[in-house]
Image (cartoon, rainbow, N blue to C red):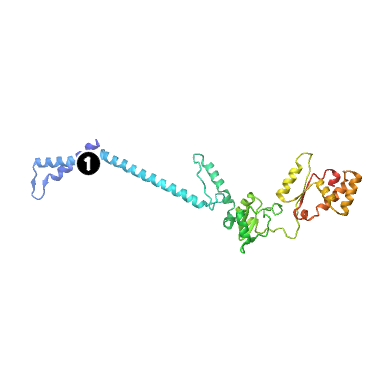
Amino acid sequence: MRKEAERKTKLAELTEEIKFDEENEERNSLDKIKAIIEDKIKEFDDEQENAENPEEEVADYATRREEVDTKMKEQLEKDAAFLESFVEGIKGEDSLNPRVVVVEAINTDISAEFVHIKILEKIKNHMQHRENLIEREQAQVLKPSEVKHYEASFTYRHSKFGRSSPLSPFNPCKTKDFAVLYRERIYFLGNKAEQIKFLLEPSKYTKGKEPVPLDIEYRPTASVIGLPASGKSALASIISQKTGMVHLKPEDVIEFFITKESFFSEKLRLRIKQQGSELDDSTLIDMLSMRIQFKDCLERGWVLDGFPQNRTQAI
């Protein structure tokens, strides 16, 4: 109905335009008017038909859409490749201690709350230790083979903690396997876990921390006791190997003093001949007290293996 009404309106307009020739005031012939009207109406119908059936335009749209999709996919692949190379670059060579925290891909098919928790977990160390962002850049891990070169230089020196770890200054284990260079000072950490903690907050363990005075003698001491065949000697041997402490067995101490040429050793040999193989507790304690005053025990400390054996020896 709408199309028919538009067609009638168009026909009335054309009839009005060509009805008279105003200059000559001559009426156009009916055939001429009819021909002109038919041509105009045909053009009008063609325009309406093209507007209602835009098949060519639809085909052009589909082609353009396919071209745009192809370009977008190519651009997406380029962006993904660039992003991957960019992430590898900002991470740096040390994957355990990247220069910049990078949040890897997270499965977003789950709830937004869970994604938020995962992101916070990824950047926890970065945000919790934010005050040490600049200080962390000053800390550098040293390989064991590099430590001797830094020690020999005139620029870098040992820290105020010396060979001790700033996280555990009284730990008898001394090692150079986990050294860190921080503000031109070399710090020796006790193990990998201490090294990681120090790298996260280097200023926390150095600023305002007083080292152990060098004039204070500190030597570790320990005693391993237990039931027979419970592994006392094995444990004492491990402690000695790990810490450098002198491994002392009562029988070894007795043999040591018996074989020495001294007045005490002569009295000891005579007492053993008189009393047999058994020694009283006071004599054994005297020997151990003398042994721990030797230079090796004073410098490295000592660990007793299977002593004391009773209440009297302990007191």
Residue closest to the eye, 244 or 123? 244
**Residue 33 as seen in the image, left or right of residue 106:** left
How many numbered circles are shown?
A: 1
Give the residue furthest to the bottom.
154
Determine whether the residue tagged by mark 1 lies in a helix, strand or loop.
helix
In this rendering, position of residue 26 left or right of residue 195: left
Residue 144 at x, y percent in the picture: 62, 54
> Relative to 206, is 70 on the left or the right?
left
x then y, percent, for residue 112: 51, 42
Task: Farthest residue to the top: give it.
Answer: 1
At 63% across and 55% down in the image, what residue appears? 179
Residue 207 in the image: x percent, y percent?
65, 59
- Across and down, in percent, residue 102 comes to 52, 49
Q: Is residue 291 visible?
A: yes
Q: Nearer the viewer, residue 21 or 120?
A: 120
Measured along the vertical axis of the image, is residue 149 above or below residue 88?
Answer: below
Location of residue 251 by image quarter = top right
The reply to whether residue 11 is visible in this rendering is: no
Query: Which amino acid is tagged 1?
Result: Glu
Which image quarter is the N terminus in? Answer: top left
Which residue is more in the foreground, 198 or 162? 162
Task: Specify few, some or many for label 1: CA neighbours under 10 Å numbering under 14, 14-19, or 20 or more.
Answer: few
Residue designated by label 1:
47
In the visual, does 50 lie left or right of 283? left
Q: Quadrant of residue 148?
A: bottom right
